[in-house]
Image (tube, rainbow, N blue to C red):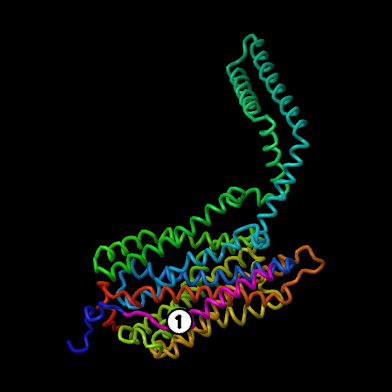
Amino acid sequence: MAGIKNGDDFRDGERFKGASLLQKLCLGLGAGGTILFFVLRYATPANTGAMSYSWLFAVVFFLSLAVGGLFWTMLHHATNSGWGTVVRRLMENLAILIPVLFVVALPLLISSVGFRDALWEWFPLRAATLSHSHEEAVKEQAEYVAERKAGIDKAKQEVAQAKKDLAELSSPSPGHRFYMEREITSLEKKASALEAEDLSDEGAISTLTDKHFLHSEALLYKKRGYLNESFWWIRQLFYLVVLGGIAAVLRSWSVKLDKDGDPRWFRWMRRWSCGLLLPFATAWTFLVFDWLMGLDYAWFSTMWGVYLFSGAAFGSMAFLIILLTLLRRAGYLRKVVTMEHYHIMGKLLLAFVIFWAYIAFSQYFLIWYAHITEETKFFITRNTEFWNTYTIAFIVIGHFFVPFTALLIQGWKKKPRILFGISVWCLLMHVLDVYWIIMPDRGPSLTAHAEKVQMLIPGAWVYDVLAFVSVAGIFGYFLLRMLRSASLYPCRDPRLDESLNLVN
């Protein structure tokens, strides 16, 4: 049929060769901004707490875009979608930046920088509580051991006395004998349990330390199996290996498919994407538990992982539409990407506008209805003073009603300029959503012991902007490098014909 495109005509792919000046600018902004940020950190140590939140905000936002790119790549393979083949390489290039962003996140994770303890207060609280509990345990050790040994002797005496009483009974009834034997068994178990306790110096101190820890910080004690430094680092390594590893492997196979056209790479990408969706979801869910929910270790939400996932998928799709449009304006991908691709990407963006709103409202409704103090304080903070106006204007109206209304218009989703504008708005709302997740905790957390708790830290927005620009520069530099490293679309993928001739 006339007009049908043949994938064989596009087997050589299309290389990105421009934007060298932009790449240098991104490198300058990223490197210069980062240096300036950490110079200010050490020059003004009093601002360390405020700056830690700024760096976390920037890292989480750009990491969410990269993780969203990985999600769309895996979903594309797992569902055997043909429509997105020509834009899948952009998703892969976004996903491959995950390891870069973990490197950028290192200042948050390393205690010596000072950010970690300012953000995740359970670290210093746990250390201080354990230290105090240990000191108290050392003081009480001798008295405790003597008391427990006396208890063991007493328990043994009670067992011996009970046996003696039973032996002295001349002709007890069966019921009386049964009662006495059961009592003896109970006393023997009690004595055995007391004897089994480790009353060495180390054992006694450990027991007393746990006792004081539980008395001082009961909630932190109950979560000690999860909230401890060793397991923390194991989890961070797990997140990097899973998220970064999946992204690297899928992109590697995709590039190899470009070179030799061997269908095994196509099959492996499909199979492994299906199998690795669960580890992907687990890694992202627990990462946002640790990094964001962990800002207040007493707060919890069972919908938190899904909420952050929906935001990542929403923001990354908006970013992909923006990136695709900019590339087409520069003369790339014009022969392979049509308005039909824009239409589907617009529909996916609309789908995640709705899904995000559904999860956000469900989380709010369930927490507010249950009225549990540990849960409701998240929304109470965000409904106070400045943050109340912010929530209504940006999170409710800006993040949902505005893009929802615009994307309902079918014709707009086929017009790149209009969809580009909507996507810019959506990406801005995603920025403000991540800011809303993190920043309301900064004021109350840093001024908790002051005479008056502040909802906002004066002047801290400067650090927020500087951190965002710095990480954006690093992100942009490596993204442009990845765009140059391979064809802009998978040029020998078996589904290329379907994507080139897309009609929906």
The quadrant the C terminus occupies is bottom left
Q: Among all residues in the image, which is located at the extreme right?
A: 451
Q: Which residue is mark 1?
A: 20
The residue under the point 65% across, 61% down is: 113
The residue under the point 24% across, 66% down is: 262
Name the main secondary structure of what is drawn in magenta.
Answer: helix
Q: Is residue 156 visible?
A: yes
Q: Position of residue 391 (x, y in %)?
A: 62, 77
Mark 1 crowd level (few <14, some 14–19, many ≥20, 10 Å Cα)? few
Q: Position of residue 327 (x, y in %)?
A: 40, 84
Q: Among all residues in the image, which is located at the extreme left?
A: 1
Task: Give yes or no for residue 429 being in the magenta stretch.
Answer: no
The quadrant the N terminus occupies is bottom left
Q: Is residue 384 above or below residue 132?
A: below
Q: Is residue 229 above or below residue 384?
A: above
Of 118 and 33, which appears nearest the observer? 33
Q: Position of residue 304 (x, y in %)?
A: 54, 64
Q: Which residues are magenta?
A: 14-41
Q: Position of residue 116 (x, y in %)?
A: 64, 60
Of 452 and 135, which appears nearest the observer? 135
Of 86 and 399, which appears nearest the observer? 86
Does residue 92 appear to the left or right of 221 in the view shown? left
Q: Is residue 380 visible?
A: no
Dot 1 falls on a residue whose secondary structure is: helix
Q: Amino acid at mark 1?
A: Ser
Give residue 288's quadrant in the image.
Answer: bottom right
Give residue 201's quadrant in the image.
Answer: top right
